[in-house]
Amino acid sequence: DKRWSLQGMTALVTGGSKGIGYATVEELAGLGAVVHTCARNETELNQALEKWTASGFRVTGSVCDVSVREQREKLMVEVSNIFNGKLNIFVSNVGTSILKPTTEYTAEDYSFVMATNFESCYHLCQLAHPLLKASGQGSIVFISSVAGLSGFLSGTLYSASKGAMNQLTKTLACEWAKDNIRINTIAPGFIRTPLVEEALKVEQYVQAFCSRTPLRRIGEASEVSSMVAYFCLPAASFITGQVICVDGGITVNGFY
Ligand code: NDP
């Protein structure tokens, strides 16, 4: 059934060497897409590429720091060359966090978090637009966070950058609907990845988080990547401008 396949589609996933990005590359490739990904660390990227190739997935990769404008431009030229100017799927996954009290953030912290999380996402959309339009059937997925929707004790820069992505989802969905490009966002809750390795070691924090989560546990990267894939499938062709939480229910703020 074509509605449940990505056969013949091309995809760019940023930050695919670890965590949610890694799971997303596998998910999309497993459903038949040809995928290009990127990361800063060349060794880890190559290790991931070797694994995928051995599994029969069609994945290529570039070393690229998406927080740097020139590197984003170079990445999109490479993507355009590999996929003959046509891109069906763009997943903006790269994101990072620096946790400090707000009064202690430096100008460098601000630039680093905003450039990595929001500017990269915004500019790569601009660069990907002609390729997505040329494909005739484009889909963009942002990996945001529940921190962009709900209040948290710290991380104001992170939450502001994710809140910006959530709003961009809605406005861009209106603007690019005429080009048959859909834009949807996933706001994950606490997901087991290298990014949160340290936080996962703090039992008190994990327990506090789980106690406010109806499903009472931390999520897995594959539970986020399945939602990415769904947004990109022809089966989701009437879905655009949505922000959906993959969070075990923490944002329902109910009584349980
Ligand atoms: P990880 O740190 O585990 O993985 C990040 C991936 O992105 C790695 O492949 C990393 O490779 C790459 N990357 C990081 N910075 C850059 C950069 N500047 N340029 C290119 N590649 C980069 O993160 P997660 O998988 O946990 O997070 C993915 C997304 O999910 C982020 O946007 C995050 O904010 C979001 N998220 C995660 C949650 C969680 O609990 N884990 C919760 C909510 C949202 P390299 O280091 O080699 O560049």
Image: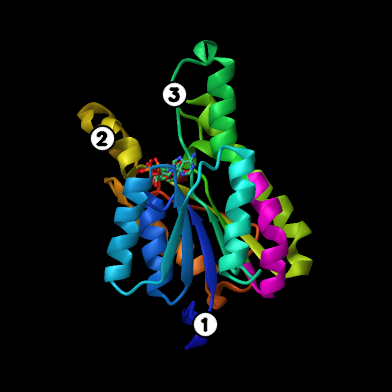
User: Label 3 is placed on what type of residue?
Assistant: Leu
- Would you say 73 lies left or right of 100 here? right
Distance, label 3 to label 1, CA atoms, is 42 Å
Distance, label 3 to label 2, CA atoms, is 17 Å
- Which picture quadrant has residue 136? bottom right
Relative to the observer, which residue lies in front, 174 or 51? 51
Magenta residues span 122-138
**Few, some or many residues within 10 Å of mark 3 (<14, 14–19, 20+):** few
Please check the rendered image and state whether residue 125 is part of the magenta-colored stretch, yes or no: yes
Q: Position of residue 43 (x, y in %)?
A: 32, 47
The mark found on residue 200 in the picture is 2
The mark found on residue 3 in the picture is 1
Q: Earlier in the sequence, mark 3 or mark 2?
A: 3
Q: Which residue is mark 3?
A: 153
Q: Position of residue 138 (x, y in %)?
A: 64, 68
Residues tagged 3 and 2 counted as in contact (Cβ below 8 A): no
What residue is rendered at 23% in x and 27% in y? 204
Ligand 1, seen in the image, is in the quarter at: top left
User: Label 2 is placed on what type of residue?
Assistant: Leu
What residue is rendered at 53% in x and 32% in y? 159
Q: Position of residue 48 (x, y in %)?
A: 32, 56
**Does residue 131 sit above or below 91 in this rendering?**
below
**Few, some or many residues within 10 Å of mark 1 (<14, 14–19, 20+):** few
